[in-house]
Amino acid sequence: MRFNKETFVAGFALFSMFFGAGNLMFPPLLGLKAGDAWFMVTLGFVISAVIIPLLGIFAHARLQGTMLDFAKKVSPTFSLIYCILVYLISITLPSPRTASVTHEMVIQPFFGTSAWLTSVVYFSLVLLFVLNRSKVLNLLGKFLSPVLFIVVLSIICIGVFSVQNPVINPSEFKTPMIKGLLEGYQTFDAIGAVVVGAVIIISLKIKGENNFIRNRRVIISSGIVAGMGLLIIYSGMIYNGALFSTQFETNVTRTELLSGLSFITLGKIGKTFLSILVGLACFTTAVGIITGTADFIKGLFNNSQKVYILTAVIACFLGVLIGQFNVHNIVTIAIPALMFIYPITIILIVLNILPNRFTSPLVFRAVVVVTIMFSIPDFFGSIGMQKFISPILEILPFGKYSLAWLIPAIVTLILMNVLSYKKDKTIS
């Protein structure tokens, strides 16, 4: 695998589109509560927020189409419904959340202005970038992302090397690895992989790069660069949260913890650095999400540029409306949606990575249907129906850990391939 200037530019652009509000907020608090079990929490978090998204980028490199290709083996109708659902979730939850975080951590503490004003200005700038999408890769990859990476890395390094004989609290989690895995859902990185991966592909094609093998190499290389960046940042932020766990109350909010860590590591200038970090992280993610959504809708309407512009405007308008709510409310609303769509997304990524001989259309359909069926109890449990769902989840393997879909999906994948093998052998 060759790494050159192009792959690093694309890799940093991809990293910046992944590394947004959720990526910044969740790891430190997770580390704080994980305490001495921070490594196991990190392992779970990395699986759902680094490895699976990286596999999603690899799947894009293999398909080099649109998001519709991810689920086309199930059926064209299912694929369309799945894509619309993912893009709808993306522009109504993680995208507005970036504006909410920016307001709470960057604007309100310094200027005291309203959330409405922040959302309007913020998404006006996002729209400006989205409408100039041909420059997105270069702007993100050459300028914004390196600054973003350096700022957060400085906080991590100073924190790690400044503490002598650290005292770390005991963990609050009974199953730290599972907790880390599920918390990784909130980053939206698996969904981000299937959304922004398409942005990289379309951006390459706009630049006139249509060589399949070359593009595959660029996409895979850039995915590895982005994945390494995420791994360093996530593990570092979680460890910093654990490292300073004795200096914060356990009921500290995510934004308060980030501000506190920046002050401890960087002093008074920490808040300024953190403001830059939050603003860049949130902004680049919003640009990636809305660009991907506009690309998709544009593709459904014969590549109409008017449709692209209209979609971008609507997505930014929704961002303004929803982005003025506080972060906690948006995170809470996101949980049920994630409990349903994340397992389906993970399974589609895995199926698209496996060799074709193991993923016939029949296998795709069976595994996805089973995944949906066994995700329903987790979904109902997340909307307050735990009392009625608990007896079912107690029976299912990993059901009490909100992973009731995992074993049935694996068993179905194996069983369907065994049956297909026996059928082929009988015919021959």
Image: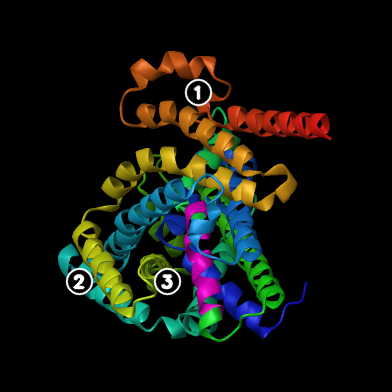
User: Is residue 150 highlighted in magenta?
Assistant: no
193 in magenta? yes
Amino acid carrying mark 1 in the image: Lys
Is residue 381 rendered to the left or right of residue 369?
Answer: left
Q: Work out whether 318 lies above or below 5.
A: above
Q: Quadrant of the N terminus?
A: bottom right
SS assignment at label 2: helix
Residue 255, above or below 123: above
Q: Which residue is mark 1?
A: 400
Q: Amino acid at mark 3?
A: Thr
Point out the tag, 1 or 3, that comes first from the N-terminus. Answer: 3
Dot 1, how many residues are within 10 Å of its Cα: few (below 14), some (14-19), or many (20+)? some
Report the magenta residues as a range: 190-204
- Secondary element at image label 1: helix
The residue located at (33%, 54%) in the rendering is 88
- Residue matched to label 2: 120
Q: Is residue 114 above or below residue 207?
A: above
